[in-house]
Amino acid sequence: MLKRYLPILSWLPHYQRTLFSHDLLAGLIVTAMVIPQSLAYALLAGLPAVVGLYASILPLFVYAVFGSSRTLAVGPVAILALMTAAALSGIAEPGSAEYVEAALLLALLSGAMLTVMGLLRLGFFANFLSHPVISGFLTASGLLIAASQAAHLLGIDSAGFTLPALLGSLFANLPELHLPTLAIGAGTLLFLIVTRRYATPFLTRLGLPDKLARLMTRAGPVFAVVLTTLIAWYFALAKSGVAVVGEVPSGLPPLTLPPFDLPLWRELWVPALLISVVGFVESVSMGQMLAAKRRERISPDQELLGLGTSNLAAAFTGGMPVTGGLSRTVINFDAGARTPAAGVFAAVGIAIVTLFFTHLIHHLPIATLAAIITVSILTLVDLEALRHTWRYSRSDFAALLATLLFTLVEGVEAGILAGVGLSIALFLYRTSRPHSALVGRVPGTEHFRNTARHRVESDKHIALLRIDESLYFANARYLEDTLYDLIASRPDIDHVVLICSAVNLIDASALESLKAINSRLKDSEVTLHLAEVKGPVMDRLTRSDLIEALTGRVFLSTYSAWRELRNPTGTRSDPPSISGPPPIHD
Amino acid sequence: MLKRYLPILSWLPHYQRTLFSHDLLAGLIVTAMVIPQSLAYALLAGLPAVVGLYASILPLFVYAVFGSSRTLAVGPVAILALMTAAALSGIAEPGSAEYVEAALLLALLSGAMLTVMGLLRLGFFANFLSHPVISGFLTASGLLIAASQAAHLLGIDSAGFTLPALLGSLFANLPELHLPTLAIGAGTLLFLIVTRRYATPFLTRLGLPDKLARLMTRAGPVFAVVLTTLIAWYFALAKSGVAVVGEVPSGLPPLTLPPFDLPLWRELWVPALLISVVGFVESVSMGQMLAAKRRERISPDQELLGLGTSNLAAAFTGGMPVTGGLSRTVINFDAGARTPAAGVFAAVGIAIVTLFFTHLIHHLPIATLAAIITVSILTLVDLEALRHTWRYSRSDFAALLATLLFTLVEGVEAGILAGVGLSIALFLYRTSRPHSALVGRVPGTEHFRNTARHRVESDKHIALLRIDESLYFANARYLEDTLYDLIASRPDIDHVVLICSAVNLIDASALESLKAINSRLKDSEVTLHLAEVKGPVMDRLTRSDLIEALTGRVFLSTYSAWRELRNPTGTRSDPPSISGPPPIHD
């Protein structure tokens, strides 16, 4: 019981030296890698850079206790930073004390919501974010974040949280282009892109072991940070107008209390909910993917608790909303982390930096951070998915496109709501017009397939109709139409057998329709039978008066219906007619 | 083509004398019956009584041309009157010129929406109002309307559109109880109830033909109207404080132009939409029921056009929102109407009354009208449905109860939205946790059933898993869980056959899950097969890379999968194990 809510108990008692050395190395690497990232995401959220560090300390400890994934690395991430900035933009001036407090509140609300959802075991809600919606959302977020960073690369101002607003302000401010900033930004960007693509093969060719080469490639951003900071310090670039991180207070994270301001709570609960959901989905997707690689499992409900408590920790230690990040998790996993202890070691590392070395960050150019974010975030952009999804399903494509466009043009919340809403609407629309097929017997077997697709035996007096959908309110009337049209167009029919192999539910509306169909067919002297009714559906039907009123029988299988109806007295011998195209498979 | 949009062309060319005499008689009866009703519903809507007459003239002509039901009688109805009053309550003083204009606008907007929906063939949207939602809505509406009429029966004031508000104001105003009004109201109520229950058998016993006896019973309200009007006139009850209809202007309906007032349009479009939807559903339910009795059919899309144009006609002739009414349609049908010409004759009758005889209505007590509405509306209240639905399905019961309670407490719009929202949410929830069953072969057949319910053959190396739901985003992850748990709990399994007989859709999210399952099972050295994949689903899968990556095969039937996997080389001969309870049916 305790183990279920405290996953730490499942690994800490068996912790031994091999695991320790793996985790320690991973923790050190992650420390070096995620510091620039954390600073950058805090700035992206409109917060002081140091908030990014604060949010990368205590939350990691807490996640190690409550989180169910072994390798997920929590902390500030790009998408939540963007959503935080959008949520707070109307509330206070970015960087002001009020703004920082509102960010704490956002973390508190989001943490509380995630924790409560976890306790209520609502992890399944994440399922309603379909694959195309997540894909469209990530691509759009990548584009939005890249657009927001473009201004930092060019040394100009920009404003807004939608693509039109961002591009508009970029173009409007283009005359203010700051060349030294551009030089640093574009230089770093180029360096990172080249490193990403060519460093590993180059270093391997130099004779480095493959693993070390890959590690050094991943450390590209750290080199860029060190190099550009040195340049900015040596040439005193801040004086000539290059934006740098500036003064970062040293010391451990402060103990903070999010403001108790009811109107503000009311204003922030919807963004907090969306931040919770998006953070949860990003985290679970990542966690599940990596757990699968190691044959481990994660529990969505426990993840809610892990992320919820991490956000609460962030709220009380001067942080911002956090979740399991894509890039920091990949770094952690690739660096060989085995247990959440790696996260603890990284947290210790970041705490040490925050305590003693923040002055080293002073001259780090913002443009460097922008370049790092841009390169890492553009991996989210997957335009190929558009083509794949279009080929596979128009409905899924529509959901993807709607999410993508709404996110770009109306913002993150609108995009997700549009995508989820459209996915659900299209699913309901599909199920409201179910596919149905008249089936016949595959000769020599007891198997029945669509007369239009397969070469099968049929009998003009017996209509075997397979309904390919659960029967519920949205398609109850459609079912009536289908049956009445069938009877009207084929006057020879004496028996209709509704094959319910695909009917997983008959709700009260559909029950009424079946009763109406039964009595209408009775008036037309057609007998209605059911076949292959599944257990749970049959259990329910026996509690209604349909079975009693039914003019025909309930057959266990289509074959038994066919056999009995074709030859009720055992005397009939006219052969069935065979028609349809030749068999396709088998 | 023309016939499709003008159903009148399908019956007018063949119109002959028998039809004419039937329709004329029905028209006369309807005229006498619906005049008090029309007055009452206009008053219920907070409009001058004469508006009810105006709304019962031109709309009937128009419906005769565009409507697809032969016997539906359109006009003002109780539910729409209540919804009209609720929509306009915040906009103007009931009875004022501004209020009357706003009612015209409501009819115009609703007419335009219905017409456009008809042209776009959106009739299927009505399907999303499930049977329990309609049932809960009608019961709640009946109770609300009865509560609103109680004040008129007692001669006191009341206010509000929700049950708490209505009952609260009733109790608060009870000291103002007006005894003469109560005498008329209660007397009429008693008379109507007694007539309804005992008049037909009584008159038959007196020797009247059965049909005439039933007709006279139905004419009960007309007797009540005539009698109480005479009493009120003779004793000049209006002077002693009994509310009467009062001055009703005579003359044909005026030509009116709904106000072109943009803020008002914005305020009214949501209520207009709900009025359209509710009116459409009431009308279609009624029309379909009666059409079924005569083996006729109605077209929901054409009904939208018929009701839309009727409402437009009401908007331009001083009317109010109209639809096919429950009680007036029953009267029309029972009186023997054969074609929409009966409606035209009734319209002519009402026009004649409006032209020449409105002064006769002056002394008609409002309490009489309230009694008529109360008796006719309480037939909508179906508390028995609560019990039935509870027995059949908890989900449907929840939707019914939510609609009922929300309508009573929060109003008509909230009730419908709550009911539809909950129905859809519960359906999605159900489909997100699909039932699945391990199946085995029913001995001696090619039929496969649940191993837990039937005595069937199975093989410990082959898991035949039937998934009882379409695979889509909401259950994709659940499918993965189900399969991984199955593999983990039964290490003997070499083959998993996913039986897709109930899978009507595999969307992009489920496709990703299937790919993940396939590669994960491959790592565990378990082969994944599919069986009974339906044509449309298979068509789509062949456009993806799943089939190529699949470790196993796609079998046409479960039996062929069973045969081939159990005996791939034709040599194996160990018998399958038989387990499970004895067969239930068949």
Image (tube, coloured by chain):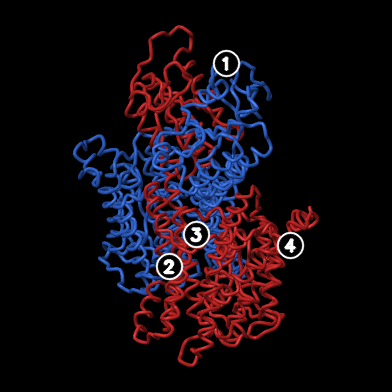
Chain colours: A red, B blue
**Mark 4 and mark 2: span between their CA atoms?**
35 Å
Quickly name the residue at label 3.
A205
The residue that appears at 70% across and 61% down in the rendered structure is A23
The amino acid type of the residue labelled 2 equals: Leu
* Subunit under mark 1: B
Instruction: Compare residues B186 and B63 and report the one nearer the observer.
Output: B63
The extreme right residue here reads A13
Q: For the residues carrying marks 4 and 3, which lies nearer the camera in this image?
A: 3
Residue A102, given in percent of the width and then of the height, sits at 60, 79
The residue that appears at 45% across and 36% down in the rendered structure is A468
Q: In this view, does A566 lie above or below B496?
A: above
> Helix, strand or loop at disc 4?
helix
The amino acid type of the residue labelled 1 equals: Thr
**Mark 3 and mark 2: span between their CA atoms?**
35 Å
Q: For the residues carrying marks 3 and 2, which lies nearer the camera in this image?
A: 3
Instruction: Compare residues B369 and A242 and report the one nearer the observer.
Output: A242
* Subunit under mark 2: A
Cβ–Cβ under 8 Å for marks 4 and 2: no
Quickly name the residue at label 1.
B571
Q: Residues within 10 Å of mark 3 (few under 14, many from 20)?
A: few
Quickly name the residue at label 2.
A143
Q: Which label's residue is closer to the chain start, 4 or 2?
A: 4
Q: Is residue A67 above or below residue A229?
A: above
Q: For the residues carrying marks 1 and 3, which lies nearer the camera in this image?
A: 3
* Subunit under mark 3: A
The amino acid type of the residue labelled 3 equals: Arg
**Image disc number at residue A65:** 4
Instruction: Compare residues B387 and B145 and report the one nearer the observer.
Output: B387
**Mark 1 and mark 3: span between their CA atoms?**
55 Å
Instruction: Compare residues A441 and B261 and report the one nearer the observer.
Output: A441
Cβ–Cβ under 8 Å for marks 1 and 3: no
Residue B87, given in percent of the width and then of the height, sits at 44, 66
